[in-house]
Image (cartoon, rainbow, N blue to C red):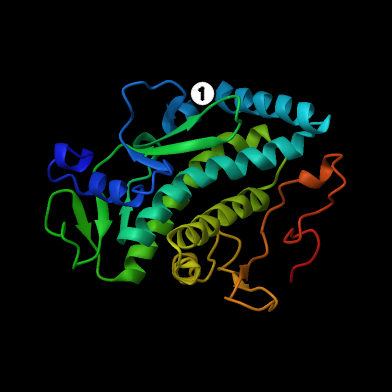
Amino acid sequence: MTTAARLGQDYLAASVERITADGTGLLSFGLPADHTGWVTCDTFLADPAGFSGWAADLAGWLRDTYQDSPDRTVAGYLMSWYLSVPALAAGLLFHHERRVPSIRPADLAFHRDPAKTDPDGAALLSPYFACLPDDPAAGTHQAVVVADEQALAAVLRGRYRAHAAQFIAKVGPQVRFGNHTLWAAATDALEGALWLAGRRSGDEGAGVLDAGLVMGDGRPPFTSASNLRPAPKSGGPTQWTRRRESCCFHYLLDSGGGECSTCPRLSRKC
């Protein structure tokens, strides 16, 4: 019996099951019986040691790999990784199912193996979601119906903004970044998640369109509208690229690689 069948009319669980049918394990509904390595986002944000402990694990990995662990590089990585958790959870559901789940910190968890440093799974904990009028769940107690795709995109944007704001309020005092840099990282995570959802489904162009729909006009606190654009022609299907809004500070490591090709430090036009 499938998870969705066991949960009966649990529409969101069924959505997650369809999305993860390829076995990637990026997203789940509910926590597994063995909670080892899992933490709810609200618990993580309420614990001052949560971010610093994660930072210490990453700093150790960077030292082992690059013989250095600049504070800005550690913070840049962790901002991107954490913000990708609510962004990807919402982005996958929006792209595949035209549903937007609750991504409040209390309704979302992530898994991290300290040996791997970055999150390798997220779990939705609430069965409630927003959807379109033609959704099979419309009219049920689990679903809030909105008028159209633009309205649904606005719900996603608003829910993600609220979660990102709580994260930024908690970690902002612990990192040496200004508000613009923090929200630039949030902008990158959201657009990147929608782009990834399209690539993962085999229709990168659809992910690009979703990114444009959700990012809207880039109204503050987000730092940009979607800036996905076709990469220079090299034959074959269209390839896409974007200029990052935030820097990961990987260039500070003694790796000889310099800035990434899409780093905002290089050019505002990438």
- Residue 233 occupies which quadrant of the picture? bottom right
Of the 4 image quadrants, the one containing the N terminus is top left
The answer to whether 108 appears left or right of 66 in the picture is left
In the displayed structure image, the side of residue 128 where residue 181 appears, left or right: right
Dot 1 corresponds to which residue? 47
| Image location of residue 133, percent across then percent down | 19, 67
Q: Is 178 placed above or below 113 here?
A: below
- In front: 37, or 70? 37
Q: Position of residue 89 (x, y in %)?
A: 41, 47
The residue depicted at 81 percent of the width and 33 percent of the height is 66
Q: To which quarter of the image does residue 153 belong?
A: bottom left
Question: Residue 180 placed where, x, y %?
Answer: 66, 53
- Which image quarter is the C terminus in? bottom right
Q: Residue at x 61, y 25 (%)?
A: 115
**Residue 171 to residue 251: above or below:** above
Give the mark count.
Answer: 1
Q: Is residue 221 visible?
A: no
Horizontal placement of 234 versus 129: left or right?
Answer: right
Mark 1 is on which residue type?
Asp
User: Taking the image as drawn, is residue 179 in sight?
Assistant: yes
Nearer the observer, 47 or 73:
73
Residue beneath the point at 34% across and 37% down: 107
> How far from the left and from the top, in percent, is residue 81?
58, 41
From the viewer's side, name the closer residue of 222 and 149.
149
Residue at 48% x, 69% y is: 216
Identify the secondary structure beneath mark 1.
loop
Estimate how packed mark 1 is, as few (under 14), some (14 to 19) or many (20 or more) residues with alpha carbons within 10 Å.
few
